[in-house]
Image (cartoon, grey):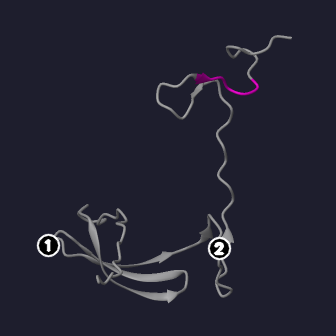
């Protein structure tokens, strides 16, 4: 019987040292609230040696949770604006698929003339 271990995979946030431009690494962090962490960083360039403190804060909900925590208050992010219907034909999801004419474009190929 095998034992399954929980492994944490941390995503990197591309932050550079403002002094030398090298990547800065997270050295430690602590929870300040359910939506905020205080983070200590250190420059990866040993010759620079700078250290920093910052905050990682969740500010809005993009996709609502299935089981929300009643103690967490975040506003819902406004929906992203869709690009305007321009004159550039789109292609179906399959590469090399047929062109799809822009909606409401009477000059589009195959549009009804009336």
User: Which residue is outermost to the right?
Assistant: 114
The residue at which mark 2 appears reads as 66
Q: Give the quarter of the image for residue 26.
A: bottom left
Mark 2 to mark 1 CA distance (whole Å) = 45 Å
Q: Compared to 41, does 97 lie above or below? A: above
User: Where is residue 18 drawn, in percent x and y?
Assistant: 31, 65
Q: Give the quarter of the image for residue 20.
A: bottom left
Q: Compared to 3, does 60 lie above or below? A: above
Element carrying mark 1: loop
Label 2, residues with CA under 10 Å away: few <14, some 14-19, many ≥20: few
| Number of numbered discs | 2
Q: Which residues are magenta?
A: 99-104
Label 1, residues with CA under 10 Å away: few <14, some 14-19, many ≥20: few
User: Where is residue 44 drawn, in percent x and y?
Assistant: 20, 70
**Of labels 2 and 1, the one closer to you:** 2
The residue at which mark 1 appears reads as 46
User: Where is residue 102 drawn, in percent x and y?
Assistant: 67, 26
Element carrying mark 2: loop
Residue at 35% over, 62% down: 14
N-terminal of the two: label 2 or label 1? 1
Nearer the observer, 74 or 40: 74
Queried whether the magenta region covers residue 32, the answer comes back as no
Residue at 57% over, 31% down: 92
Q: Residue 110 has which mark?
A: none
Q: Quarter of the image containing the C terminus?
A: top right
């Amino acid at each position: 019987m095998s034992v399954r271990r929980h492994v944490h995979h941390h995503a990197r946030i591309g932050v550079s040292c403002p002094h030398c431009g090298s990547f800065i690494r997270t050295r430690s962090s602590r929870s300040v609230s359910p939506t905020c962490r205080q983070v200590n960083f250190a420059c990866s360039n040993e010759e620079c040696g700078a250290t920093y403190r910052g905050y990682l804060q969740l500010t809005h909900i993009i996709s609502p949770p299935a089981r929300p925590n009643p103690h967490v208050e975040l506003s819902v992010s406004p929906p992203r604006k869709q690009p305007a219907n321009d004159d550039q034909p789109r292609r179906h999801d399959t590469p090399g698929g047929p062109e799809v004419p822009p909606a409401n474009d009477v000059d589009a190929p195959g549009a009804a003339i009336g």
